[in-house]
Amino acid sequence: MMKNKTFTALLLAALALPGLAGAADAALAKATFAGGCFWCMEPPYDKLDGVVSTTSGYIGGRTRNPTYEAVSAGGTGHAEAVEIVYDPAKVSYAKLLDVFWRNIDPTVRNRQFCDVGDQYRSAIFYHDAEQKRLAEASKAALAKSKPFPQPIVTEIVPAGVFTAAEAYHQDYYLKNPVRYKFYRYRCGRDQRLEELWGKPAS
């Protein structure tokens, strides 16, 4: 995928030049969001200029080294999530939050669309005090302006250990486009998003 190739090239360039690795790391930031099936949360972020990479994985659980089988069975406490590496000079955290809200159903607990269980809860996992402030402000603003009557129940919690999901889950929508589209349609994700937020801008 182009964005991942760009990220790899950036890291290799930084490592090749003494003293620049720290500068390159400092220029990038990390955001983590849970919005149900992680396959569906990668595409809207991969489209954004300034997003360097997206990684599907697990966060917020009680066990070490989670696997897809264990997490999807429930009981580990993990949520399926996407970890985003981005350039704050090109895309703001506020923009990432806006994309997050409009790609989830924030009105339900421990489920998203057809997927049920706390592993499919919606949550913002903040990495520092500023991300927490912005997340809480965006949730409060949305509560005042939301186009639907139900309350917002999405969690805002500190980020813990993030474990990347198995390789076959990464960029699933690109590797298996037919299966991905069938799953997304069968799950009613786009239909529900349109009910909540209206038709997406063309």
Image: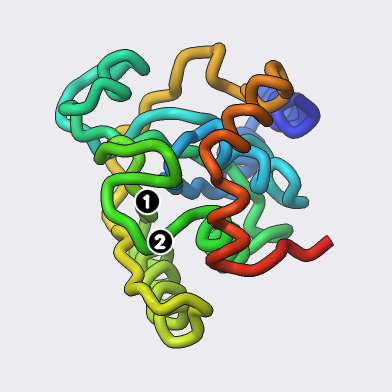
Q: Quadrant of residue 200?
A: bottom right
Image: 56 above or below 96: above
| Vertical arrangement, residue 123 with respect to residue 178, above or below | below
Residue farthest toward the bottom in the current orientation of the protein = 144
Specify the amino acid type for callout 1.
Answer: Ser
Can residue 66 be seen here? The reply is yes
Foreground: 154 or 125?
Answer: 154
Question: Which image quarter holds the C terminus?
Answer: bottom right
Image spot of residue 33 (x, y percent): 44, 48
Q: Please tell me which of labels 1 and 2 falls first in the chain.
A: 2
Res. 17 in view? no
List the residue tagged with mark 1: 122
Residue located 44% across and 71% down the image: 134
Mark 2 is on which residue type? Pro
Residue drawn where x is 34% and y is 45% of the image: 111
- Residue 192 x %, y %: 54, 55
**What residue appears at the point 64 percent right and 41 percent down from the top-left corner?**
24
Q: Secondary structure at mark 2?
A: loop
Q: Nearer the viewer, residue 95 or 15?
A: 95
Q: CA distance from mark 1 to mark 2?
A: 7 Å
**Image side of residue 201 versus residue 34, left or right:** right
Q: Residue 187, how many percent across, how many down?
A: 52, 37
User: Residue at the spot x=36%, y=65% of the render?
Assistant: 132
For label 1, the SS is strand
Residue farthest right in this picture: 202
Badge 2 is on which residue?
A: 106
Quadrant location of the N terminus?
A: top right
Towards the viewer: 113 or 127:
113
Say whether residue 6 is left or right of residue 82.
Answer: right
Q: Are marks 1 and 2 in contact (CB under 8 Å)?
A: yes
Query: Residue 35 at what x, y percent from top left?
Result: 45, 46
